[in-house]
Amino acid sequence: MKKASSDHEPTGQLTIRTLAMPADTNPAGDIFGGWVMSQLDIAGAIAASERVRGRTATVAVEAMTFIAPVKVGDVLCVYCEIKSIGTTSIAIGVEAWARRHRYKDRVKVTKGTFIYVALDDKGNKHVIAK
């Protein structure tokens, strides 16, 4: 897993990339924060499910910060790293970086910590294997 200690390089592993489209804008013309948050949740769920080797569900979002707007045409790149693993839950640090004009000027736009719980096939919590 790639680690960095600054706002100049992403922390964690690239989990998803997606293109910000006009349909996802708010009245100011920027990409709607709820759309950005959903992309972080999707990426965090992928990282959590890979680690627990099964189904997970989002149970909390902690310390979510919007740093800069996402613009139409930006490629949103979401990076994830495991922060901690409990008995049945896992905390994933998530960062979103926008590549302006699809290839130039990478900018950190959002960060947060998402908490997921491991679920069995019946939807009940289950212990995460170490």
Image (cartoon, helix red, strand yellow):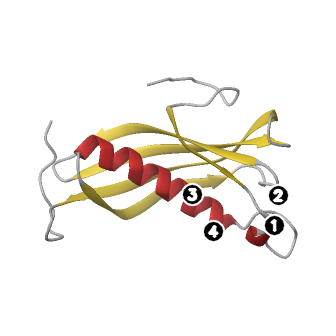
Q: Position of residue 128 (x, y in %)?
A: 16, 46
Instruction: Tell me what residue is drawn at x 77 percent, y 54 percent.
Output: 70
Residues at discs 3 and 1 in contact (Cβ within 8 Å): no
Is the Cβ of the residue at disc 4 closer than 8 Å to that at disc 3? no
Q: Given contact means CB atoms under 8 Å apart, are the residues at marks 3 and 2 in contact?
A: no
- Quick one: SS at disc 1? helix
| Residue 39 image label | 3
- Image position of 75 (left or right of 36): right
Foreground residue, 103 or 8? 103
Where does label 1 land, which residue?
22
Foreground of the two, 16 or 118:
16
2 over 29 or under it: above or below: above
Residue that appears at 12% across and 57% down: 126
Label 2 close to label 1 by CB (< 8 Å): yes
Residue 98: percent from left, percent from top: 73, 43
Residue 16: give x, y in percent of width and height.
55, 45
**Could you tell which of marks 2 and 1 lies nearer the N-terminus?**
1
> Distance from label 2 to label 4 (Cα)?
15 Å
Q: Residue at x 77, y 62 (%)?
A: 21
Among the two numbered marks 4 and 1 on one chain, the one whose residue lies closer to the N terminus: 1
Pointer 4 residue:
34
Numbered disc 3: secondary structure: helix
C-alpha gap between disc 3 and disc 1: 16 Å
Give the residue displayed 21% in from the left and 46% down from the top: 86
Question: Which image quarter holds the N terminus?
Answer: top left
| Residue designated by label 2 | 72
Query: Residue 93 location in percent, x, y?
Result: 46, 43
- 4 or 3: tag closer to the N-terminus: 4
Q: Amino acid at mark 3?
A: Gln
Sequence order check, earlier mark of 2 and 4: 4
The label nearer to you, 4 versus 3, is: 3
Q: Nearer the viewer, mark 4 or mark 1?
A: 1
